[in-house]
């Protein structure tokens, strides 16, 4: 699962990151099947247009029934949120199925 999100304003960046790291990640990782999470901040580049979100979280989900794990995530009671989380645009949540995994140099699929 991949989530793109941003603070509501640049001034709320520290509050957003504190909430995400101290409250939201532990809440998500308490769900069955959610085994790890990595957070990334977008690097400043010479891109023509600024992206909608400045942060990316990649969650590792390991479950025999992925649909059940994702349904449980959607049905969970929502924990505390923060005004520091931008809802305009809202966080973008995407689900991907693993199709290949490279574990060493020179690895080729198939």
Image (cartoon, grey):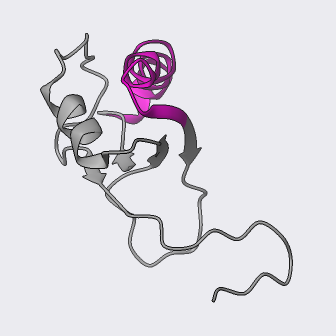
Q: Position of residue 30 (x, y in %)?
A: 41, 17
Above or below, comparing residue 48 to residue 6 in the picture? below
Q: How many marks?
A: 0
> Which corner quadrant of the image does residue 75 belong to?
top left
Q: Position of residue 39 (x, y in %)?
A: 55, 40
Q: Foreground residue, 14 or 70? A: 70
Q: Residue at x 22, y 39 (%)?
A: 68
Assess whether residue 26 is covered by the magenta stretch: yes
Assess whether residue 73 is covered by the magenta stretch: no
Q: Is residue 66 left or right of residue 14?
A: left
> Which corner quadrant of the image does residue 24 belong to?
top left
Quadrant (top left, top right, bottom left, bottom right) of the C terminus: bottom right
Q: Residue at x 48, y 73 (%)?
A: 99
Q: Foreground residue, 21 or 95? A: 95
| Prevailing secondary structure class for the magenta stretch in the rendered image | helix
Q: Residue at x 59, y 68 (%)?
A: 45
Q: Position of residue 26 (x, y in %)?
A: 46, 16
Magenta part of the protein: which range?
9-36
The residue most toward the front is: 64
Q: Foreground residue, 88 or 22? A: 22
């Amino acid at each position: 699962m991949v989530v793109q999100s941003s603070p509501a304003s640049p001034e709320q960046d520290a509050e957003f990151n504190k909430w995400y790291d101290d409250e939201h990640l532990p809440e998500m990782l308490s769900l069955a099947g959610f085994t790890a999470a990595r957070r990334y901040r977008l690097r400043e580049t010479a891109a023509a247009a600024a992206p909608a979100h400045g942060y990316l979280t990649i969650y590792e989900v390991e479950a025999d029934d992925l649909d059940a794990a994702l349904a449980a995530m959607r049905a969970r009671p929502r924990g505390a949120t923060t005004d520091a989380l931008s809802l305009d645009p809202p966080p973008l949540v995407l689900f991907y199925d693993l199709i290949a995994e490279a574990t060493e140099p020179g690895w080729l699929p198939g």
